[in-house]
Amino acid sequence: MIIGAIVAGGTGRRMGTAVPKQFLKLGDRTILLRSVDAFLNCEEIDTVIVGVPKEWVTYTKQLLDEGGYGDKRGRVRVTEGGANRNETMWLITEYAVTKLKAMDGTIMVTHDAVRPFVTGDIIRRTIKMLLSADDRTGVTAAVPATDTILRVGDNAEVLEAPKRIQMMQAQTPQTVYLGMWRRVYKKLSAADREFRTDISGMYIAAGLRVKVVDGDRGNSKITTPEDFEAAKRRVLDESTDRKEQVNV
């Protein structure tokens, strides 16, 4: 079984909007539905589980019901998320175990809902890499860093400027075997779970391996109002291009 785990538990504080950013619209689709679309259109994915804030569960189910998915709607489940990304991932995992009877060998393709431009190719690359590895390995999409990355101390002093050629910026999807992910989560302290904000950091802290596959610079994350405006322009440009192609 391969499960798409879409993390949509954020409340959008940095965005400063009345609703969580995953429920904002990009064109005629919400950010969340655009991410769900990508996973449902990937035939390798058997089921998609979306983790959202408790008070948004009912709304999310309604949003999906009205999303025009037809028979595909049955492949999407909704569960309550947690206080942070890792806790939401844990609750999605527990839903998979208790409700779907998912086994340790189940593949979990985890993805941030606010990366709505993810493609099926990226999703498949992470799955293919994981299938070529063992269960002590995680996989993340990533792109080469375009700027110099600085490691800075508490006093604003630069401690290290690593070689840029060795630096990459992590994206999602991040893909793991369900059983090993659960063991890693249980093993780490509450502080580690809070501090290590993605699967890569958690696996490295647990002494496991993480492999990288090519991400895509277009697979951008919407975090700030500026990100959202850029995403809206992108959707508008893509829509305009499609209309011009039809009229040619």
Image (spheres, helix red, strand yellow):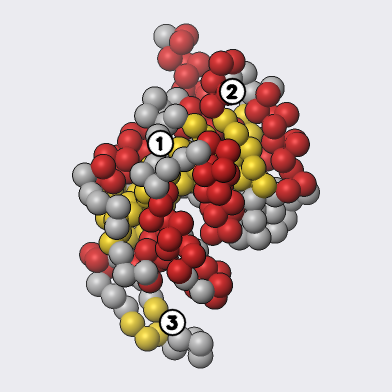
Mark 1, Cα crowd under 10 Å, few <14 / some 14-19 / many 20+, is some
Amino acid found under the numbered disc labelled 3: Val
Q: Are marks 2 and 1 in contact (CB under 8 Å)?
A: no
Q: Name the spot of residue 71 as percent of width and height, x first.
A: 56, 16
Q: Earlier in the sequence, mark 3 or mark 1?
A: 1
Q: Name the spot of residue 241 as percent of width and height, x first.
A: 46, 23
- In the figure, 43 relative to 182: above or below? above
Frontmost residue, 214 versus 96: 96
Q: Give the position of the C terminus as an image quadrant.
A: top left
Amino acid found under the numbered disc labelled 2: Arg
Secondary structure state at the residue bearing disc 1: strand
Q: Name the spot of residue 102 as percent of width and height, x first.
A: 46, 40
- In the figure, 124 relative to 225: above or below? above
- The residue beneath circle 2 is 73
Q: Are marks 3 and 1 in contact (CB under 8 Å)?
A: no
- The residue beneath circle 1 is 2
Amino acid found under the numbered disc labelled 1: Ile
Residue 152's disc is 3
Identified at 62% across, 18% down, the residue is 68
Mark 3, Cα crowd under 10 Å, few <14 / some 14-19 / many 20+, is few
